[in-house]
Amino acid sequence: MKSPLQAGYLEYARLFQHPDLTIGDYRDPMLTFLHQLNEFLGLSSDNPLFTQDLKTLRGKALSTYWAGHCLVDHSRTWKFCQGIIAAVKDKLTEKKKPIKLLYAGCGPFATLALPLTQVFTPDQLQITLLEINPESLSILQKVIQEIEIEAFFPQIVNCDACLWVADQKYDVVVTETMQAALRQEPQVSISLHLMQQFPDDTVLIPAEISITALLERRAQPTLERPLFSLSATGLEAHSGEFVQGEHLIYRDEFDLPPETDLQDVSLDTRIHIYKTWALGHKESGLTMPHYLQRNCREVSHLAFTYTLDENPSWQLQIS
């Protein structure tokens, strides 16, 4: 007889065999599965052991509880998993199996990997998991053993993904270690560090993250200014430039057209996951606007700065 967690996992993971489902179909099963995981593991937001973020040299790693809670950012989980499934299926048509997938920053539930185990077999797919938080890693091992999917995971490594050195090539690399506007967490550093180790045909998921400045005007259409994007080939400035010093810094400054009548300045995050799978404006917690300035008055010049250090962050100077 299956345990409640095994049954919940099967109901949850098998949803992903049907990519045409809508949020009304998968929202409640995701919530139920998260509740089952927390109950089985005794996870609670009241326990400080599970709610303490870890600081790294390239951004914070989310606490065990809140990393697990990302499961119920419904559109994020659904679309990322569908994009990964599509990428693995494409790789299976190109090369001999098994496909090797690297998942960096997997958290306590390996949320973006569990559904793969009901779509593929261990002969088709092998997954290496990287996680910096030892508490999350211990919990993850319990989950994998309880639902009996150990055959998919030959390596589960406790490490900082920004420092980890691969001992083999991977076909697909997955990392979702980010917040809106690429703040606070180490998505940029992890992606750059990992992808420089692999050949050009390695697929990065998400395929591209782009940051755009939204300049909201009073009684006029919003102006958009693309700033930069992150992809498998690295960082690309669409305006402004990157400067390498003690830390990598992005800068962009410009004058506003006369009569702009600027009201608010925010950053928009757009995520192209893989092929047709993407997250648009306000579709996920990852793509909510990040406001830098509200209720502007008589602004004629803007200067954006993004600093990639232990707390990746944005600054805006207005004049």
Image (cartoon, grey):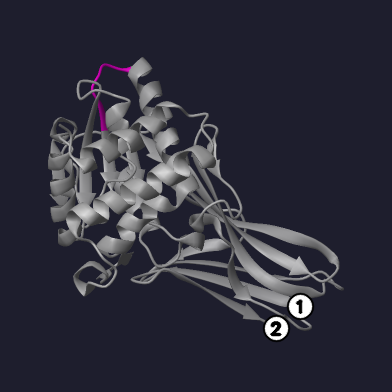
Relative to residue 314, is residue 26 depicted above or below? above
- The kind of secondary structure element at disc 1 is loop
* Residue 98 within the magenta-colored segment of the rendering: yes
Quadrant containing the N terminus in the rendered view:
top left
* Residue most extreme to the front: 1
For label 1, count other residues whose C-alpha is less than 10 Å away and answer few (under 14), some (14-19) or many (20+).
Answer: some
Tell me the chief SS of the magenta region: loop
Residue 275 pos. (x, y %): 52, 32
* Residue 213 within the magenta-colored segment of the rendering: no
Which residue occupies the foreground of this view, 38 or 313? 38
Residue 103 badge: none
Quarter of the figure with residue 97:
top left
Specify the segment rendered in magenta: 95-100
- What residue is shown with label 2? 319
- What residue is shown with label 1? 300
Relative to residue 282, is residue 166 depicted above or below? above
Q: Residue at x 40, y 32 (%)?
A: 15
Label 1 amino acid? Ser
Is disc 1 in contact with disc 2, using a CB cutoff of under 8 Å? yes
Q: What whole-number distance in Å separates the C-alpha atoms at marks 1 and 2?
A: 6 Å
Residue 62 pos. (x, y %): 31, 64
Label 2 amino acid? Ser
Relative to residue 46, is residue 239 depicted above or below? above
Q: Residue at x 18, y 49 (%)?
A: 140
For label 2, count other residues whose C-alpha is less than 10 Å away and answer few (under 14), some (14-19) or many (20+).
Answer: few
Is residue 315 left or right of 201 when viewed as pictured? right
Quarter of the figure with residue 38:
bottom left
